[in-house]
Amino acid sequence: MDTSFHAVAISKNVYWVGAIDWNMRNFHGYATQRGSTYNAYLILGKEPILIDTVKEQFFEEMMQRIESVIDPQKIEYIVSNHAEMDHSGSLVKAIAVVKPKKVYASTMGIKALNKQLGNDLKLDSVKNGESLTLGNVNLKFIETRMLHWPDSMFTYYEEDGVLFSQDGFGMHLASMQRFSDEIDKTVLMHEVRKYYANIILPYSSVVQGLLNNLPKLDLKIRVIAPDHGPVWRKEEEVKWILDLYSSLVKQEKVKKAIIIYDTMWGSTDKMARAISDGLYSVGYDVKLMALDANNRSDIVLEVMDAEILLVGSPTINNGVFPSLADVLSYLKGLKPIGLRGQAFGSFGWSGEAVSIIKQSLEEMKVELVGESLRFQYVPTEEELTQCYAFGVKVGESI
Ligand code: FEO
């Protein structure tokens, strides 16, 4: 059939039939500078199966890719691995066109899909570890609860050794290339780590459990097909992403300090710069991340493997800068571990910001080092020397 969009074979019997979102720059607060893809997959067995769908506005693109290889009405089953709208947004429309015999999801998936898309959806639940033979296709379902929603599950297609891993092992990266081995590894490294930091990080113990459990399932995984970004299709690529996840779950640290701050008339900025020199003098790689120049999602990426987190703000209306409140709330939710740090800032008269930041850092379980630092109006040369010493002290505290 003539279509504008075409399917891409990712294994003997599986086609990628997803959509490329080149221009998406904000994924619920996560800055996606490289866009994303929503990956749906078609297993072309005797009874064709669609694995996941795409964001609602990309429904036509998905359908055209399906039509490039098969009449969509020949699809007999749909599997929903994850109910979040970027993968289920087209499900209702797909069901209306395809009229599948069955739509499968986890028990929690059915609850989430019904709440989001309507209770009249006819869905069948599959259990953790359950296997199904659909035509000549053998599928095994592996629940991955809280990776990263309660409904999340993986589906393994035995004959081709494809693990459909929904958000797991994925990244926000729009590209024509469908396979990781066609893309620069530094780009993959950055985007996988950023995705992990912003979506998966608080569920690291769940990922650790999954990584421990996968070998026991005795799956012959030849391809990992996530719902975002490229497919991992070669043995060394599958090993690369599994090894990277094994390292990310441990949240290993490097000798790095992150200073996040905002500034009103430049005083907190002066403090941050002097502190950064002090930290650098005792061997730390330092990144200054002013909040008018850095998105919260890039900050959490840097914080994930940092040893030190310093947070600075001037006081405004008896509180912290709104940008700081945003980032502190975001960081707290993502639960980075193993940090030590402190608060600093400038003020005019009341000066509450520093104590508010300290409280947030304590709530984040950041180990506070020494005393916080705050100066009134514009810091003097002597006070900036104290900022430098503050950086040295925090850096030397182990
Ligand atoms: Fe890509 Fe959790 O949705």
Image (spheres, grey):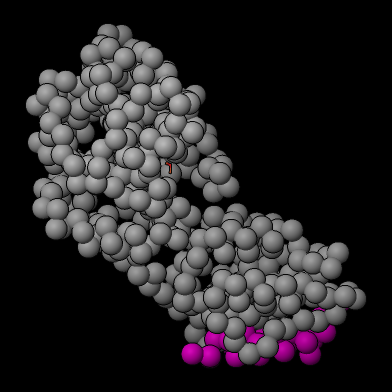
Residue appearing at x 31%, y 66% in the figure:
247
Foreground residue among 66 and 378: 66
Residue 76: x, y in percent? 23, 19
Task: Based on the picture, tell me whether residue 319 belongs to the magenta stretch.
Answer: no
Residue appearing at x 53%, y 91% in the figure:
396
Above/below status of 354 relative to 263: below
Residue numbers of the magenta segment: 377-398
Residue 151: x, y in percent? 38, 44
Does residue 252 appear left or right of residue 44 in this picture? right
Above/below status of 76 relative to 280: above
Could you tell me what secondary structure mostly forms the magenta stretch?
helix
Foreground residue among 12 and 162: 162
Does residue 196 appear left or right of residue 363 in this picture? left
Residue 29: x, y in percent? 58, 47
* Quarter-of-image position of residue 380: bottom right
Residue appearing at x 15%, y 27% in the figure:
134
Above/below status of 209 relative to 138: below
Foreground residue among 67 and 2: 67
Q: Is residue 383 visible?
A: yes
In the displayed orientation, state which residue is furthest to the right. Answer: 349
Q: Is residue 68 visible?
A: no
Foreground residue among 40 and 106: 106
Residue appearing at x 36%, y 19% in the figure:
95
Ligand 1: image quarter: top left
Does residue 284 appear left or right of residue 342 in this picture? left
In which quadrant of the rendered image does the N terminus lie? Answer: top left
Above/below status of 40 relative to 201: above
Task: Based on the picture, tell me whether residue 388 belongs to the magenta stretch.
Answer: yes
Residue 230: x, y in percent? 32, 41
